[in-house]
Image: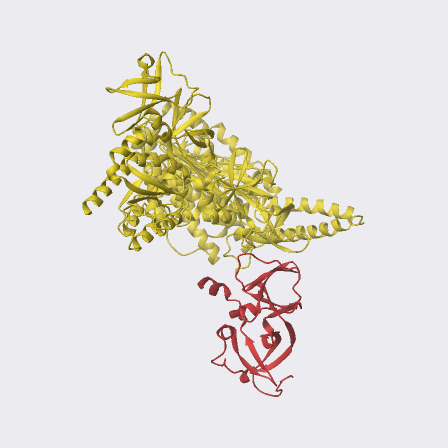
Chain colours: A yellow, B red
Amino acid sequence: MDDLLREFLTETNESLDVVDVELVRFEQDPNNAKILDNIFRLVHTIKGTCGFLGLPRLEALAHAAETLMGKFRDGMPVTGDAVTLILSTIDRIKQILEELEAQQQEPAGQDRDLIDELERMVVEAPAAKPHAQAEAETKAEAETKEAAGSLVYQILERPLRPGEVSLDDLEKAFRDTAVEAPPPPKPKPAAKPGKAVAPPEEEKSDSKVSSQSIRVNVETLEHLMTMVSELVLTRNQLLEIVRRHEDSEFKVPLQRLSNVTAELQEGVMKTRMQPIGNAWQKLPRIVRDLATELNKHIELEMHGAETELDRQVLDLIKDPLTHMVRNSADHGLENPAERRALGKPEKGTIRLSAYHEGGHIIIEIADDGRGLNTEKIKSKAISNGLINEAQAEKMTDQQIHKFIFAAGFSTAQKVTSVSGRGVGMDVVRNNIDQIGGTVEVNSVLGEGSSFVIKIPLTLAIVSALIVESGGDRFAIPQLSVIELVRAQTNSEHRIERIKDTPVLRLRNKLLPLIHLKRILKIDDGTNSEPENGFIVVTQVGSQTFGIVVDGVFHTEEIVVKPMSTKLRHIAMFSGNTILGDGSVIMIIDPNGIARSVGSSVTTQHATEAQENDDHHVTVEDTTSMLVFRAGSPEPKAVPLSLVTRLEEVDAKKIEHSNGRHLVQYRGQLMPLVRVTDQVAIRTEGAQPLLVFSDEGRSMGLVVDEIVDIVEDRLNIEVGSDTPGVLGSAVVKGQATEIIDVGYFLPLAFEDWLRRKEQNNLSSARTLLFVDDSAFFRNMLTPVLKAAGYSVTTVGSADDAIRLMKNGQEFDVIVTDIDMPGMNGFELAQTVHSDTKTANVPIIALSSMTSAEAIERGRQVGFHDYVAKFDRPGLIAALKEQSAALADAA
Amino acid sequence: MTNVNDNHDGNFVEFVTVLITDQLFGLPISRVQDVFMPVNMTRVPLSTPEIAGVLNLRGRIVTSIDMRCRLGLPKKDDNRTPMAVGIEYKGESYGLLIDSVGEVLKLDESTREPNPVNLDARLARVSAGVHRLDGQLLVVLDVDRVLELGNEALAA
């Protein structure tokens, strides 16, 4: 009885899962008699078996459900209510089965509620039947023919051909329905023979495949797998030994053993493989229920359900998948009204697809809903303290979308019964991380989102790259390794540095590098040659980085063994393994490495980041730059904030006087200056000009063509001796000359600076300008001079302090905030703590203009805080301070 | 130096005695799986200092605990290879690295004395009492507490 019962439970559970799926399909396609027959047959089998095993409660439920389904076959219209009722009946059956499994006997209880409902619907059916038939006469013609006619027999014959005993009974049952028999007589004949017949019938209905397959206990398979793993290890060990003894007689048999082991391993792995469809089975039902609950129309498409993966992985991925599909249905898809308003079809689609790629399986969950709201996620991430606003500004949409995987992150405005309770995507991500997988999100606002999960096919045995770092060996799972690069001082690939961050130029991209030694704190990595090493290019999600190791050995199939609980807190390792030579090595977890490096490796858009050899000219933030051409095909650029206007003047209006080009501009004569002598001033057509204005005077810089305005980091990499050129920088991937506006201003008006100086001679004030960036020193000094200051520039706060210690006095100090060594805040504090200089006004000049920075600035005693490119703001602030000083004096 | 009071009604516990520095420790024999020479040990970066490394003992991965470090004793200065006592704890294998293994002693539970109050805190933490032997003291090691280093490390 026990065996029988267990068999019954397994089979029935499987059948019920099928019924679930089939019913949802049937609801959408009520005319498909084939589906209905399939369901009918399954429920019938369950009923029959229950009677046979003496399970009256189950039998009664199945019977009532079967009766109602019989009505469907008789042509009763299929309503959502009826399907819901049958589904809940099936849920009840499952519930009873669970208890049955636990207690070995059918639990006590009544199912009168459901049975009454079912029967009520059956009774109401006759009224509906003629109506339905009349209504759908034309359609029904084909349908009834299908349902009652030949097709039914065909379908019946096929699965039942091997089961001779049941054929008669079922034929009889179907003949009854064909004659539109009233409900009572039908179940009876079906039920009675079913008792004796149903179990073999189910067996055989699985068609011929079932006779070739047997059920094996999962534990047996697990054990087999463990043994095979051990065998693989031993084989590896033997191979290692033979490798050391060149001409061993063991060589040939061992080769054979190795092959057999590999095949055995593959075979055992195969036994553990299951189609991913098994994990999807419950989804149609879930989506249907959700759709009803949320009043949405949802279609669930499933592709590649036959894709196989290890059952252990399958188990682990089941819940995350369900959660994500729920999420898509709840958050992702809009309700029908919204969709209509957006011009989308009312029915939203969730598409699940799975396929193999290399040694892993890719599962994609896509919906055509509203997509992720980047702004909402951003503000939530900021309010949760995950990032600050400045960081958020610099992040790409995709980087921001990643925050949905952060713990406690839910942007759902209201908590529904489905989702929005803050436990969600972080759990999904953890589950996927655990099995060494990755999840990525791609989303377009208004068009939908898609989640791409990449997981290994199996967890037990993985292919790994064995590397050496600091004298120790480590395994890096092949799954995340893209390529290997050897870096050498003189080769094309060498390790370079941006400040202290090592990078590698790889096919025009900058790859952030991580020294394995350093991240594992094996040694500080200073004594090794910094420019050499092997770089394991690794990809985790959309993040690509290079792990620098000292040596690379080979790849090996390793058996992952869980780490001791004492070591499990180390995120850098995912497990350990025993190598062929018998030694234990740690398996690197690329996810852990990626996370530990965190934001410093978020340079996926490394193309935009420039490498820079002169650290002292580093400007961290992006600058708007006007790119133009003048005199040569190479682009030139100038910070946009320095340009007053862009103009095009009619070339005919350009006049020539006293050896200079002039143009009448806004009622004044504006001198024109060429960037180089090669720039030809046009004689016809429009002449583009960059206009620089100051104190009512304007100058036009003649250029050939204005190319673009770009946002980019401004790092002057190569200085220049050419007058008027500060140096070269990479702007949007192209070497660009940065123009020194300060050089051209005096060219236009010889007295530009002198005039000012004279004007302000009486009040000429001394100004100390502190900035680590030579670019800004060059750029702003003329501006400050023009404002009437005698300017002293220094490149660091320490130099500034030294000057003041030496007795130099300044009326006002303008300083950058973000500087290597002593920063602007500290400088201000130092200046103010000295009684001699305590009253000197200090103006901060910085790209860090966040509210906190400004507040901090006030606290340390900055008199004003000006954004780095706000030139008029700086002049105004200086004037204000001078006036204040004058008043005080 | 056996100290077996036979024909006594008390509870006898057998201890494997080990030497760490010059101090004698006793491990209940019921907890000791085996004694082995740790060879080919792999150190584990980023682990707590007590963890000397991991090694392969007949196909099992054993986590080795440096008992000197665990007990706050000075590092080993001679080059003699340490010995290891294999312990099973919550289904995992551990090896306690000690200087040398002595013999098995059968000691009467009733003669076990509580830790002296002034015992070094790091020692007191893992000690389950002291037995007075001829000419020396034997500190009984509480194996479970020795291996509870994860929590302490996390709390620190």
x, y (%) of residue B57?
65, 61
Relative to residue A767, is residue A615 drawn left or right?
A: right
Query: Which residue is outermost to the left?
Result: A887
x and y percent of residue A2 in the render? 54, 56
Q: Quadrant of residue B35?
A: bottom right
Out of A886 and A272, give the one closest to the viewer: A886
Quadrant of the image containing the N terminus of chain A: bottom right
What x and y, as percent, mark residue A746? 34, 28
Left or right: residue A616 versus residue A536 is: left
Which sits in the foreground, A688 or A320? Answer: A688
Depicted A138 relative to depicted A863: above or below:
above
The relative height of residue A317 versus residue A662 in the rendered view (above or below) is below
- Residue drawn at (64%, 77%) of the image: B104
Find residue A656 and report its horizontal and vertical position in percent: 33, 14
Nearer-the-camera pick, A429 or A729: A729
Residue A846 image-quadrant placement? top left
Q: Is residue A803 visible?
A: yes
Image height of A128 relative to A236, above or below: above
Number of numbered callouts drawn = 0
Q: Nearer the viewer, residue B49 or B106?
A: B49
Residue at 63% across, 80% down: B105
Q: Residue furthest bottom?
A: B7
Tell me, yes or no, if residue A4 can be seen here.
Answer: no
